[in-house]
Amino acid sequence: MIIVLKPEASVQLTNDILKQIESLGLKPLHMPGKERVVLGALGDERVLAQLNLDSHPMVESVTPILAPYKLVSREMNPEDSVVSIGAAKFGGGHFSVIGGPCAVESYDQMSKTAQTVRTAGAHALRGGAFKPRTSPYSFQGLGLEGLEILARVSREVGLPTVTEVVQTSDIEAIVEHASAFQVGARNMQNFELLKAIGQTTTPVILKRGMAAKVEDLLMAAEYVVSEGNPNVILCERGIKTFETATRNTLDLNAIPYIKSKSHLPVIVDPSHGTGIREFVPPMARAAIGCGADGLIVETHYDPSVALSDGKQSLDPEQFVEFMKEIRPFVDAVRKAML
Amino acid sequence: MIIVLKPEASVQLTNDILKQIESLGLKPLHMPGKERVVLGALGDERVLAQLNLDSHPMVESVTPILAPYKLVSREMNPEDSVVSIGAAKFGGGHFSVIGGPCAVESYDQMSKTAQTVRTAGAHALRGGAFKPRTSPYSFQGLGLEGLEILARVSREVGLPTVTEVVQTSDIEAIVEHASAFQVGARNMQNFELLKAIGQTTTPVILKRGMAAKVEDLLMAAEYVVSEGNPNVILCERGIKTFETATRNTLDLNAIPYIKSKSHLPVIVDPSHGTGIREFVPPMARAAIGCGADGLIVETHYDPSVALSDGKQSLDPEQFVEFMKEIRPFVDAVRKAML
Amino acid sequence: MIIVLKPEASVQLTNDILKQIESLGLKPLHMPGKERVVLGALGDERVLAQLNLDSHPMVESVTPILAPYKLVSREMNPEDSVVSIGAAKFGGGHFSVIGGPCAVESYDQMSKTAQTVRTAGAHALRGGAFKPRTSPYSFQGLGLEGLEILARVSREVGLPTVTEVVQTSDIEAIVEHASAFQVGARNMQNFELLKAIGQTTTPVILKRGMAAKVEDLLMAAEYVVSEGNPNVILCERGIKTFETATRNTLDLNAIPYIKSKSHLPVIVDPSHGTGIREFVPPMARAAIGCGADGLIVETHYDPSVALSDGKQSLDPEQFVEFMKEIRPFVDAVRKAML
Amino acid sequence: MIIVLKPEASVQLTNDILKQIESLGLKPLHMPGKERVVLGALGDERVLAQLNLDSHPMVESVTPILAPYKLVSREMNPEDSVVSIGAAKFGGGHFSVIGGPCAVESYDQMSKTAQTVRTAGAHALRGGAFKPRTSPYSFQGLGLEGLEILARVSREVGLPTVTEVVQTSDIEAIVEHASAFQVGARNMQNFELLKAIGQTTTPVILKRGMAAKVEDLLMAAEYVVSEGNPNVILCERGIKTFETATRNTLDLNAIPYIKSKSHLPVIVDPSHGTGIREFVPPMARAAIGCGADGLIVETHYDPSVALSDGKQSLDPEQFVEFMKEIRPFVDAVRKAML
């Protein structure tokens, strides 16, 4: 950690800080410059957080040298982690596709859509029973009934399932009815929810928040892993920027960045990442090209009657074509897709 | 609502949509242009949401004419709402200041800080017992013990209190121990939490999310109000942008925008909005100048030992000076501050 | 164009606007709603700009239906344009790679680097003689001498060249010494420069500005094309967002969006788009996957001595490997790379 | 400067870098940590730029300690600079207002508008003769004829003038006809233009670019000042963010930040900063509250016929009222407005 003092800081302060660094078991360094005094602390700088040096009126800046996350870092675990949702594997050279509608609307809708997902060769089924919607006047999801439909359809088509969790009190029901949690962008920093998920062993797809830096996403994953659940799949789904041509700005730079910093698998959601169904296939290919370990894609048996996100959902024919079309790209990056 | 069809859309589709609009009780309009067919729907366009026209592959764009919120809109209620937290009033010409530390750390810390808040002439006390922290390795708050400290100090100094709520299961304890909820930026779209708060009558300060448009903030408020709780105070606290000179970019444009669209009071948090204590007084004056109904400001009896956010906290002397300094500006906008 | 009037607008204003729309040769439409009066104008709405309806105090909003650009639009020209820089072709199924250093530093540096570019199989050579640098204390480029070096090396290795233009008065020298202009992100809206380039026939690579929407980029291209120069290649090179993990946020969504709206070729600059050499190959593969017509990539015979942008430059070995590695992806999208 | 090496960096590299730092006359520091080697360099770190350490494959990060600008910094000149445009003074406790239309449209328009500007008590007149417009189909300004109109009206009403410069070749004519340059947001990093302005003694209002950090703005000012022209007035006019409720996001945090880092005066443009005339007065008051040294505000004798930016222009009555209304706020911050 590098601590820069203000020009008017006293010699006394310098000495105090150096002593505090030492007392915490770190190696202190003193660099008296012409315009500023700079101090250093070498060792596990996470313990320095308790000094709150940032708060001192005579401290100009504090710059960490090491990353703030540990368990999810590649330095901790140089090998790629492989996370499984049922038979679908993500990471370590495995590539899988999760398909399905935004929301569970009815047994009929889920059943028809799941047939397509299976026929097309995708590996898991998505569908939300609890829906966080911007407007209180929009469809809010079927709740527990939706979970039951999802579980029934899952058994019928033989695909594992992913469903969104929006509050701690729904965790038990989801563990019972689905194969994996999805934490949506709006809940990425709902830390109580992350801690509770961390106390299960159910895999979780953790979506990046719309204003979250990649480092924030890794810290959110650290919450889950530090509670004991290592089965975290990260998901890039677009961030908020000034561009309005697409629903979000899909930040694919995040993929190689995450792969360089963390051992966790990372997938891409080109449906939310673009908001426009025609852009889903090209951005899926892009995601594969830059190293994603899987995709989560919205599809609906008839997007024109979907209760949410129809604009970005592939229809059955498009989804079948999509699964065919991505295979040469998965091959080109030498990953295994069942 | 204005619906633009793709050039290749059929006459049949045009007629279908016009019929659907009519069947929902709206007035349909047909505008066949040279390059595009444009359709209109006049009336309460919220009912059109169920048509999901946006999802149709032959629909190019759907543009609403009316705002998506209703209960919080100024058209619904042209008069300013006044929301009270204890004796502190916000809105309708009333201006109040909430001061206190980021987190409740101990009885001693709260008691000392609250004395300053009171002496300086501020109107309510803030202090978090449940803290959402980016890192699992940071101080996470005292929980229920923190609430009890807050309540005790509140009685001793005679100030109403505001404290953050991070999950539904804590609502009951907060209603018992504090005067108002604060929903933090990270929970602005935690819709289950908003609905549960909407079922109480306790006032709530709803902070704008870091990636939330003002319209999203108003929709979040609509969630609370539509459940039955009209006591919502909006709070601008800075958004995420490319600028890193300050912790966030305080979007003061939001103040006159909100005042023009909504009857709810709106306050500003210059502490999180800047992240730097020296910038708190000037940005507080700016907030008053553009029409804010109050301020929420971090102060600590000794910021250099604060367990969180010390860098942006005023010390006692600065807070006393701050309260003196803002008064002429409150007078200049002709608002009443007790 | 859809014009929404404020609730308090008079009937007189409605009639005035309808008459004005008619007098300009467009078809006016009147949609009197319960809460708002909405007016429409059908036809070439670009002529409506002269009415400045947006400026009227009683007009709430004005929403165009058609895109503001015309010559660069796909509706104008449904077929892909092919733009050539020497023998390198971009668009219409052709894919080419431009390689070279950020800046021309010396004959020796350019010559060594150009050998690699050629050997590796890239199709054109880049190198800046006029450098726009954020700091007046950074290397500012060799100017005319740099152009002469570039021209000499171009003849020696037999590759066409691309070089940045930063002011109108340098256009003549660049036309003489190089094969194509590059307009940098900072000059994308230097409209005088665009107009002057439009009066030549030399191809131009137009880079997207850091705060420019894709629509702004297309409007900038419209400036060049409307002056008579159709040889425009668009270039996505990253935009400014809150994310700091990478130098910029490469907005690959822009590629399918541009391909859907415009006939112009579009290439990607993964060097500026990431700022980190390790991320250049994966993001190049991503760019190919989502439909880019080419790449512009920084390489230097020894990045550790580069006078600018060394951190994002590939070394010779990496560049050779890079060219090999992208070929299967170009094949997979069925484009032709020489 | 703090240099962090990658874990795999050799001892040889460490020694090389330390020697290079020493050879440039700086004091080298060696901090061998458990996980990383950290090196420091104390002294004028601008000279280190020539080492391009950032480019080395074994260097993880390079963090400067000192600001990259020098001449514009407050450390260089602790006293506020006062810049005059005619009799209008900005900075050092002086506050002035520049009013006028976006563009010079005709003698009649300028004359009528200038009368209002003068009567209302503003201190300088704005009006653009050269207009950078996003669309080639929009009004492009009157050019030299516009400058002549501006000069004539200036003599008639006795107010100094500010006009936009968009290319180097127009500088001479502007110096002859106007009192000050304005560099627009799109040209803030047009470094050739900045250098040429730096070679005059005419004051310049330098507007912040839409994607420019405050530090970039200060670097752009450094270009002008380092060429010899100290008469720079900085201008905050809003940045590009995800928020679309207003035309731009006015970043008022920039005002106290700039005042803390630089001795140059800074003004605010609430017209472009909001894009909506009703928000100009409140945001002007906010700007005064947080320390701005002046304002630049659009006004037109009849905004409903303005050829550009009418939506954000005050009409004569509003401008007169505006000038009255801001005075108590200027008084409250204890600045002198003539």
Image (cartoon, coloured by chain):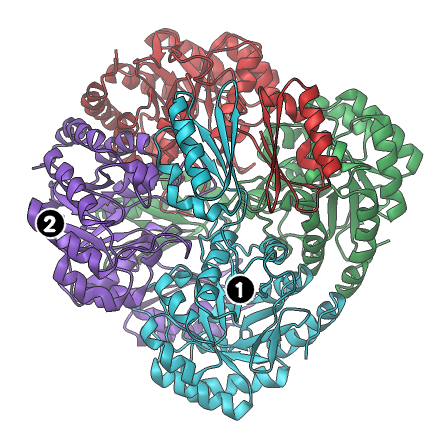
Chain colours: A cyan, B purple, C green, D red
Q: Are marks 2 and 1 on the same chain?
A: no
Direction from residue A201 to residue C57 in the image, left or right: left
Question: Could you tell me residue C172's position as x and y percent?
Answer: 76, 24
Label 2 element class: helix
Label 2: chain letter:
B
Q: How far from the left and from the top, in percent, is residue C46?
A: 50, 44
Q: Amino acid at mark 1?
A: Leu
Labelled disc at residue A234? 1
Q: Is residue C286 above or below residue C177?
A: below
In the rendered image, the vertical position of residue D227 relative to residue C15, given as above or below: above
Q: Nearer the viewer, residue A219 or D182?
A: A219
Mark pair 2, 1: CA separation: 43 Å
Could you say whether the residue bearing mark 1 is in a helix, strand or loop?
strand
Residue A192 in the image: above or below residue D187 = below
User: x%, y% of residue A84?
Assistant: 57, 77
Q: In the rendering, which numbered label is found on residue B154?
A: 2
Q: Residue furthest right?
A: C156
Q: Residue at x 36, y 70 (%)?
A: A166
Judging from the image, mark 1 belongs to the subunit labelled: A
